[in-house]
Amino acid sequence: MVHILAKLNHVRASCANTWVLRACLAVLMGASLVGAGALFAAHESTGLKVSDSDNVGLESVIAVGPATYGVAWAGNDVSRGVYLAEGSDRHWTQSTVVLPTVGRAWNPSLVYSEGEWIVAWTQGSRRFPSNTVRSIQWRRGDSDGPQVLVPDVYGDVAPHLVSAPTGLHMVYAAATDSARALNAELYYIHHPPSASGWSSPQKVADLGGASSPIDGIWRPRLATDTAGETLHVVWERTSDVSGLQYSIWHLTGTVQLSTTNVDWGTPTQLSPASQRYAMRPDVAVDEDGEAHVVWTEVIPTSQGSILPAEAQHVNHWRSTAAVIQRVNAAPIKVNSTQPTWTSSAVTVGTARLCVAWHGYAPDDAFSKEEVALRCSRDGGLSWQSTANLSQSEDQLSLFPAIVMDPEGIVHASWVEEALSGVEFRPVGIYYGLHDMRSAVFLPLVVR
């Protein structure tokens, strides 16, 4: 029962009317770490609130297109729906409701394709318990309304959408039986450029016959090479190996251009057996076709507890070397109530690899999470100084999402939580950027 409660807590965690400008975005060159145990570099940027309401969920996503960038997020019980804010030339437009849902919407995914924003999300009467029916829906640009892509599924369904020259690709983990909501398996759907609709769901990874209540696939992420012909999927797998164990898995697929079908390989485990708690992966593919995967490694206490954990680390794996390396310079700590462990994200472009996560160092003066960013110019062989994107000593900065534009600027979004009474509550979705090319200020303007 303890293991199942831990899994449910993990699932839960993954789960003002005017624009607020906290400060200009200071975009500075990385500097030396301050002190041996410090988490951040001396030169950092602050964030801009892009949601016009404090009533936001815990997930945000960010994407870029030619001369534009956008952030999408889901509302909470008060502001139900999926929201989108769009920026261009360091300006932001007012956020717009993609869909004012009757029920709840969560786990949005966002891409920019052929001149328009495409959003997908999960929708249902409520997110938890996960054995209530839900569906995957999407909306393309300013179309008439949302469309149901996948009806009647169960579990903590989190669709991940990618746009490529070979069309739109999506992966998600779900169960088709409410009694097996925690035993989700991995599915894939595809919308080729010349097709009028999406393919039927294809199961691409199962549980191998495992039947334990804690065996399942969670939080899949997808990336493609530049041509969109090679797909890389990663996910978190829970299994009952003398108790609850978390592991990270990887699967590749090749798009057959003549038929648009995908030939899938065999799933392989990336996290070593020595990492009993490896979770929340992300993946990106560089211009040379090399896949870069990051995930959280949780170190339990001497009593075996991961709620809270003794320490955490962000791991990086690349497909050509198949070597696992820790990205963070100092152990990562998070608060003991929510989210209980860190979440990392990865992006690549213009000969640079960047990884973000939330947390604080054990010796930080303020024991509240910040959004950290660390980059590499040699594919992860060495890492530059860690930057702080959030700069919010009195608030929690959680669940970063990042993307790199063609000029090499990293754009990030995250949720901020502030103390309300005796607990922290979300107060908005924030945006920050980081440009390591020159030590200049790039102020944002809100209109």
Image (cartoon, rainbow, N blue to C red):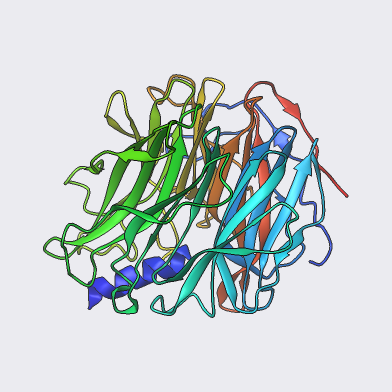
* Residue 111 visible in the shown view: yes
Measuring from the top left, give residue 402's x and y in whole percent: 57, 42
Measuring from the top left, give residue 221's x and y in whole percent: 43, 47
Quarter of the figure with residue 243: bottom left
* Number of numbered callouts drawn: 0
Q: Which quadrant, please, contains the N terminus?
A: bottom left
Quarter of the figure with residue 262: top left
Left or right: 428 as drawn, with respect to 301: right
Instruction: Name which residue lies at 80% across and 37% down.
Output: 443
Instruction: Name which residue lies at 56% across and 78% down.
Output: 422
Decide which of 313, 11 is in the foreground and name it. 11
Instruction: Name which residue lies at 65% across and 74% down.
Output: 101
Measuring from the top left, give residue 268's x and y in whole percent: 23, 41
Examine the rendered structure and indicate whether residue 142 appears above or below residue 2: above
Q: Residue placed farthest to the left in the image?
A: 242
Examine the rendered structure and indicate whether residue 443 appears above or below residue 154: above
Decide which of 396, 189 is in the foreground and name it. 189
Examine the rendered structure and indicate whether residue 407 appears above or below residue 317: above
Instruction: Name which residue lies at 35% across and 50% down.
Output: 235
Decide which of 432, 230 is in the foreground and name it. 230
Decide which of 325, 368 is in the foreground and name it. 325
